[in-house]
Image: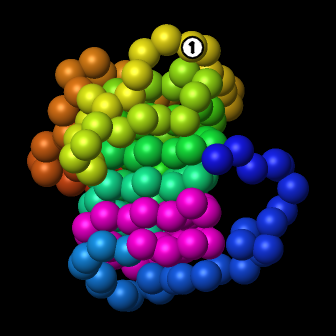
Amino acid sequence: MKRNDKLSADDSFVNSIIGEGTHFRGHLELSGLLRIDGDFSGSIRTSGKVIIGKNGRADCTIDAGTVVVGGAVRGNVYAEERVIVLASAMLLGNIYAPNLVIEEGVVFDGHCEVNGRPPVRSAMPGVGRGLLGGGRGTVAFDHGERGDRSDRGERASAGAFEAAERAATARVPQ
């Protein structure tokens, strides 16, 4: 599904929100925009946009049209259009998207597959190696490459997640 760059009705308001101080575990399937400012674990599927706010934490698989990460994410991210990782973000997991933007200062440990086409998942949701190779995509780094790449294709350990989170918290002014 290819959407144009104009703001659609689904993107003009927050359809669902997990607010700061909220802890939610489960599977969310929705249309429209989801914003996470609290803690979420499980899986997310939407044709719309997922925004992880600066204070948001998600330990999950995300499957969305567009994903914007400003907080902490541990898990695989699949996007039909693009993934945007903001300077305040920490992402420990794999990214599969046709376009990727990473700002300077991001903590990233994972594998990227950016080839200009939406990802094709294997039969099992959340399985990492489901993207077909080939093609060309767009990867944009803001003021230099600060994200680390890893071809291991495995999820980051909980210890690495906590260490990276402490490092990110120490360098991000509150």
Q: Position of residue 83 (x, y in %)?
A: 56, 43
Residue at position x 44%, y 45% from top?
78
For residue 36: magenta?
yes
Residue at position x 61%, y 42% from top?
82
Residue at position x 54%, y 21% from top?
115
Q: Is residue 37 visible?
A: yes
Query: By what rule are the colours in the image chosen?
Result: rainbow
Q: Position of residue 88 (x, y in %)?
A: 53, 52
Give the magenta-colored segment's residue range: 29-54
Marks counted in the figure total 1
Residue 142 vs residue 128, the one in the foreground: 128
Look at the picture and state if 67 lies above or below 129: below
Question: Please, which residue is most extreme toward the right here?
Answer: 6
Residue at position x 36%, y 87% from top?
22
Specify whether 164 is left or right of 154: right
Residue 140 vs residue 50, the one in the foreground: 50
Secondary structure character of the magenta stretch overall? strand
Residue 52 vs residue 47, the one in the foreground: 47
Look at the picture and state if 139 lies above or below 12: above
Question: Which secondary structure, mark 1?
Answer: loop
Q: Position of residue 122 (x, y in %)?
A: 28, 37
Residue 42, quarter of the rendered image: bottom left
Residue 113, quarter of the rendered image: top left
For residue 136: magenta?
no
Specify whether 135 is left or right of 56: right
Q: Is residue 103 visible?
A: no
Question: Please, which residue is most extreme toward the top here?
Answer: 134
Q: Position of residue 65 (x, y in %)?
A: 58, 53
Residue type, label 1? Gly
| Within-10-Å neighbours for mark 1: few <14, some 14–19, many 20+ | few
Q: What residue did someone put label 1 on?
A: 135
